[in-house]
Image (cartoon, rainbow, N blue to C red):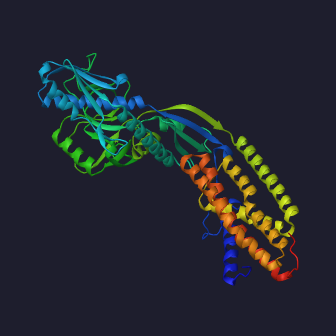
Amino acid sequence: MLYFARWKVAAIIGVILLGVLFSLPNVIPRSAMPSWLPARQISLGLDLRGGSYLLLEVDLDAVVKERLEGLADGARTRLRQAKVGYINLSTQPEQRRLSFRLRDPSQAEAAMAAMRELANPITTATGGTTPDLEVANNDGLISATLSEAALRERAAGAVEQSVEIVRRRIDQTGVSEALIARQGASRVLVQLPGVEDPNRIKELLGRTARMTFRLLDENASMQATTPPPGVEFLEGDQPGTRYPVRRRVEVDGANLTDARAGQNPQTGQWVVNFTFDSVGTRRFAEVTRQNVGRPFAVVLDNKVITAPNINEPITGGNGQISGNFNAQSANELAVLLRAGALPAPLTVVEERTVGPELGADAIRAGLISLAVGASFVFLYMGFAYGLFGWMANLALLVNLLLMAAALSLLEATLTLPGIAGVVLTLGTALDANILINERIREEVRAGRPPASALEAGFTKASGTILDSNLTNLIAMGVLYAMGSGPVRGFAVTVAIGTVVQMWTATTLVRLFVSWWYRARRPRTLPV
């Protein structure tokens, strides 16, 4: 087993050379690298590079409130269609409930049936479906309450959607290597390496950016203290202006496929041009065709941006939003609309800024620990196993080189836990060589000749090496699946180190021993 064919030797040397090439971009500027070489690097995380840390919380109460308001609009329409008379229709977000009183209690069954039609099906733990509303009648007082299962599903969906939309928004700002992950039941973790002033990011993430197109109620009196049913008074883009806007959403901004900032060629003002998908195009054409001559409001986060009159049907699926925009505000609105609306507002509950000086200290400490750990490991292997120990040390250097190459190809983000994973790999990478060397010693004590002892040492220790490293890989797989952020980085680093060290211990060190044995033909082994 100490014989290596030439193609195997060439393959091993080729792997090492590739490791060198793929590691070079981390120490040589990209401009000096050849164009054919993938210029991928290991990125430094927040704790090493410095930057900003934000912990955002999703306002789940707003999710409940929005569902109840939509339910109230639907209830008015359904009850009117069913010819059911009612009074005092109101929502109680604290109790997650909508209620109204019937004028005629004998219509209770019809009213309850109309409310059940507004329920949305949700999937249960057993795989079945159940309505998200619990409808009840108490002497003519009809109530529709959101179920606990519905709350859990809407909360989970809101947080997951928020994570995805936050990721899209940050990606479009140009911040690289940002970490966005869910934390707990209602929070989103955002780490921004290299961003020392997160105010612009906070403003971008703090806007819900839900855009809707709604009709104005031309019969509503703006002098009234309370709006009529189905209408709300919203502030306009200009200070001191208010609009009576119908609560019914005619077209939702979720149907937008694109939004770009531009300038109106006639006025030179900054505008945002948008495009609808097929559903939005059809709905927009239908609404504008049926309401020619009426004002149509563009509402963003409960604020009217503009409310122009519909002069003619708009059937092409394209539109333009005008307002008091400059270049920056138009571009920011376009970014928000392209990324999509948040399902609920986000609030910053924790904010930290890590300076680059602290990151430099962390890198220095990590490198020192790496150097000290490597030195002690090298000395131990050299004194304990002699020449074979120094061969294992040489393989360990190749191990570090190949780890750097693999992390570079993955464009991994290195954090302090990642450095800890590298240091841990240093300590465990030589376990395989220790098993091999101890097995060789046992074979020598048993009286086997050198060639037979070497072959038995590498062959019989391979099974134990594979088993021990497989259990380590399983543990790292669980960490990666269950953890997030730095924990995943640690798991990836250790997993890569484990795979690489199995190859260097059982293949590369064997090649070194083979070369040495064929050159010396020793009668005794220095182990």
Task: Count the labels in the image.
Answer: 0
* In the depicted structure, whether residue 280 falls above or below residue 76: below
Residue 205 screen position, x and y as percent? 48, 38
Q: Quadrant of residue 110?
A: top left
Residue 347 appearing in the image: yes
Residue 20 screen position, x and y as percent? 70, 68
* In the depicted structure, whether residue 143 falls above or below residue 424: above
Look at 36% across and 35% down and name the residue there.
Answer: 149
Point out the image quarter for the C terminus.
bottom right
Lateral position of residue 125 relative to residue 205, left or right: left
Q: Which residue is nearer to you in this view: 123 or 22?
A: 123
* In the depicted structure, whether residue 481 falls above or below residue 129: below
Residue 3 screen position, x and y as percent? 73, 82
Q: Residue furthest front?
A: 446
Q: Quadrant of residue 299?
A: top left
Q: Which residue is nearer to you in this view: 399 or 509?
A: 509
Look at 16% across and 40% down and name the residue there.
Answer: 290
Residue 302 appearing in the image: no
Lateral position of residue 253 relative to residue 402, left or right: left
